[in-house]
Image: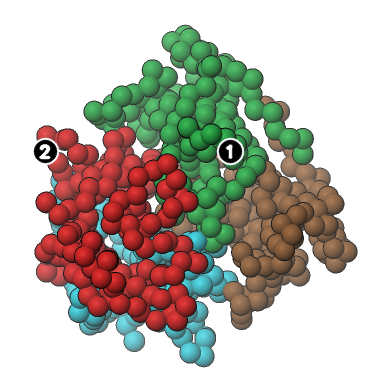
Chain colours: A brown, B green, C cyan, D red
Amino acid sequence: MTRIHVPITLRWSDLDAYGHVNNAEMLRLLEEARIRVFWADRSAAEGHEVPHTALIAGGPDAETLTLIAAQQIEYLAPIPYLRRPLDVQLWIGRLGGASLEICYEVRSPQGDPEQVLYAKASTTLVLIDNATQQPRRLTDAEREVWSAHLDEPVAFRKR
Amino acid sequence: MTRIHVPITLRWSDLDAYGHVNNAEMLRLLEEARIRVFWADRSAAEGHEVPHTALIAGGPDAETLTLIAAQQIEYLAPIPYLRRPLDVQLWIGRLGGASLEICYEVRSPQGDPEQVLYAKASTTLVLIDNATQQPRRLTDAEREVWSAHLDEPVAFRKR
Amino acid sequence: MTRIHVPITLRWSDLDAYGHVNNAEMLRLLEEARIRVFWADRSAAEGHEVPHTALIAGGPDAETLTLIAAQQIEYLAPIPYLRRPLDVQLWIGRLGGASLEICYEVRSPQGDPEQVLYAKASTTLVLIDNATQQPRRLTDAEREVWSAHLDEPVAFRKR
Amino acid sequence: MTRIHVPITLRWSDLDAYGHVNNAEMLRLLEEARIRVFWADRSAAEGHEVPHTALIAGGPDAETLTLIAAQQIEYLAPIPYLRRPLDVQLWIGRLGGASLEICYEVRSPQGDPEQVLYAKASTTLVLIDNATQQPRRLTDAEREVWSAHLDEPVAFRKR
C-alpha cells in the first residue's frame, strides 16, 4: 500500500452556515495534510516525528518554494463536525521533471466500520528555486523517496 | 459580452505566510462572487441592488439547495494585497438538466491598463430540492436568464 | 489543579503574512478548545471520549444556546508554526446565574522544558434557552461539575 | 465628529453554523478596518485613495511593526449576512508613548433608518522598530494626525 494516511482534525469553525465543512475549507485540510507529509520543517517539528517523505523545507525563505499550479476536487458527501480526525489518504499521481501531482482521498476516521469517502482531489505542485525563481528539477533523492508512493492519479468524473 | 463582472475586495487576512492570497482562500473569493450573482437573498440585500441572475434563495432553509459537486482551479500568478477590488469575471460554461458549470477568471482591478489574469476556475453546481433532497431540474426561467451568460467553458491546461 | 488541558493542533494556514498565528485566528483556537470541553455532541464524538465537563449540546438546534457576550485577550508572544499541539489550559473564572466566564492560557506544547505563555484570554458565555430565546439559569448539575474547575479569573494588564 | 467610518463588506463565509458572523471572524473585520485606516501601503493602494491617517507602512519588512498587545470585544447583537457594507466606526481611545488604543463600534450599514450596534471593541497596538525589535515612540506627525480622532475609550460592561 503506497498511500500515506494523515489524520486531520476538524475544527468546528470549518463548518459554514449549512452545518457542513465548507467547500473552500476542504482545500485547507488538504493543504495541512500536504505540509505534514512534504515539509521538513525542523523547528516546527521539534519533538515530533517528521515523515521520511518530508524533503522540502517550507516557508518563504526556503531554498525551494512549492508553487501550487492547479487543484481539482470532487465532493462526494458533506462532512459533519467530527471529533476524531479525518483519514486523509495521500499519494503521488505523477512525478514530472520539476513538478508532481499529489492525490488525496478524504475519508471518515480510520477504524470506522464503513469508511465514508467524502472527497477526491489533486494538487499540481511545481518546485521553484527560490534564488532564480525558476522551476528546478526533482532531485534523485526526492524521486526515489516519493516514487514509493506513486500510484494511479485520481479519476475524476467527466465534466 | 456575456460575462458578469463581480468586484471582490481582498482582505489582508486572505494572505498566507508567503504574503500572497492563499490557494484555498481563492475558492472563498469565488464563493463570494458566485453568491452575489446567484442568490436572491432579499433580507441580505435590503437597500442593495440584486442582479437579475439571482434566482435562487440561499441558506439552509431555502427551497433549493445548491450543492457543490466539483471544483477546478488553475493558478497563473500570485495575488498580492490590493485595496481596489479584484475583477472576478463569471459566466456559465454548461447548463445541464439539474446542474450547471460556473466559470471564472480572477483578474486584477478593472481599469488597470494591463489586467493580470491571476486564476481560472470552474464550479459544478447541482440544484437540490430541499424537501426531497433529490436533484431538481432547472426551471424555464432559470434557463432563460442564465443562458444569456453561456459561453465556452474554461480550457484548463492538460494535466 | 483545576485546569483542563486541551491539546490544540495548529494549521499552517493559521499564520498570517507575518509568519505568526494571526490575532483573530487565536480566538478560533480558543473556540475549538471551549467546544471540546463543553459540548456534549454525541454524534460528533462517536468513538471519542467526551470529557465529563461536556454538558451542553452544541449546534443551532440544541436546547441551550451558548451566546458569547464578550471576549478579552492579551498577546504575550507570537506563536510560530508548530507540529505538536499547543497546550491550551482552560478553567472557569466565574459561575454566574445564567452566565460563566471561561479563562484560558495558551502555552507551548506540554512537555516542553520551558513552556512559553503565548496568550491569556477570557470569554463570557450566556446560556440561552433556545425555545424562549431568554437566558436560562445554570442547572445544579452544571454548577456542580463546572465548579471543580473554578479558579481566579485571568488578571489582565491594566489598559 | 472624530470617528472614521470604514465600510466593511461581509462575506458569506464569515457566518458559522449558527448562520451569524462568527465571534472570531469579527476580529478579522476589525483588523481589515484598522489596516485600511492606518497602513500607508502604496503598492496595495495604487489607484485607491489612502486616508490621511495611514502613516505606517504595513507588512513584515516595514520599518515599523504594529504589534497587537491586547483586544477586547463585547458582542451586542448577532450579525446576519448583509450585502451592503457594515459601518465600522473607528477612533483612538488613548495615545501613549509607544502605543495606542484603537476603539471600534460595528454597526449596520450607513443610511439604515435605525442603525443596529452589533459590537464594541478595542485593540491595543504597540509600535515596534523593526531594526531593533524594541518599542519606538510615536512621532510628532503621527501624534498630530491621530489626535484629531482621539475620543473617550469604549466603556465595556463590568465583568
Residue drawn at the location 64% of the way across and 61% of the way down? A35
Q: Point out the residue furthest to the front here.
A: D141
Q: Which quadrant holds residue D113?
A: top left
Q: Report x, y in % for residue B131.
A: 41, 25
What amino acid type should be assigned to the residue bearing mark 1?
Val
Q: Do callouts 2 and 1 mark residues in contact (Cβ within 8 Å)? A: no
Q: For this rendering, which residue is in front, B116 or D152?
A: B116
Point out residue B17 in the picture as x, y percentages from the top left corner.
54, 61
Q: Chain of mark 2?
A: D
Q: Is residue C80 above or below residue B156?
A: below
Q: Does any portion of residue A44 appear in the rendered image? A: yes
- Asked whether A17 or D156 is in front, the reply is D156
Question: In the rendered view of the protein, which quadrant contains the N terminus of chain A?
Answer: bottom right
Residue displayed at 64% across by 20% down: B152
Calculate the distance from the C-alpha at mark 2 to the C-alpha at mark 1: 42 Å
At 22% across and 55% down in the image, what residue appears? D90
Outermost residue on the bottom side: it is C113
Q: Nearer the viewer, residue A11 or A117?
A: A11
The numbered dot on residue D114 is 2
Which of discs 2 and 1 lies nearer the camera? The answer is 1
Helix, strand or loop for disc 2: loop
Asked which quadrant contains residue C26, the reply is bottom left
Q: Quadrant of the C terminus of chain A?
A: top right
Q: Relative to A43, does residue D150 appear above or below in the rendering?
A: above
Task: Check disc 1 and report the residue beneath it.
Answer: B116
Give percent across and percent down for residue C52: 36, 70
Residue type indicated by callout 2 = Glu
Quick one: SS at disc 1? Answer: loop
Check disc 1: other Cα within 10 Å, few if <14, some if 14-19, many if 20+.
Answer: some
Total numbered circles:
2
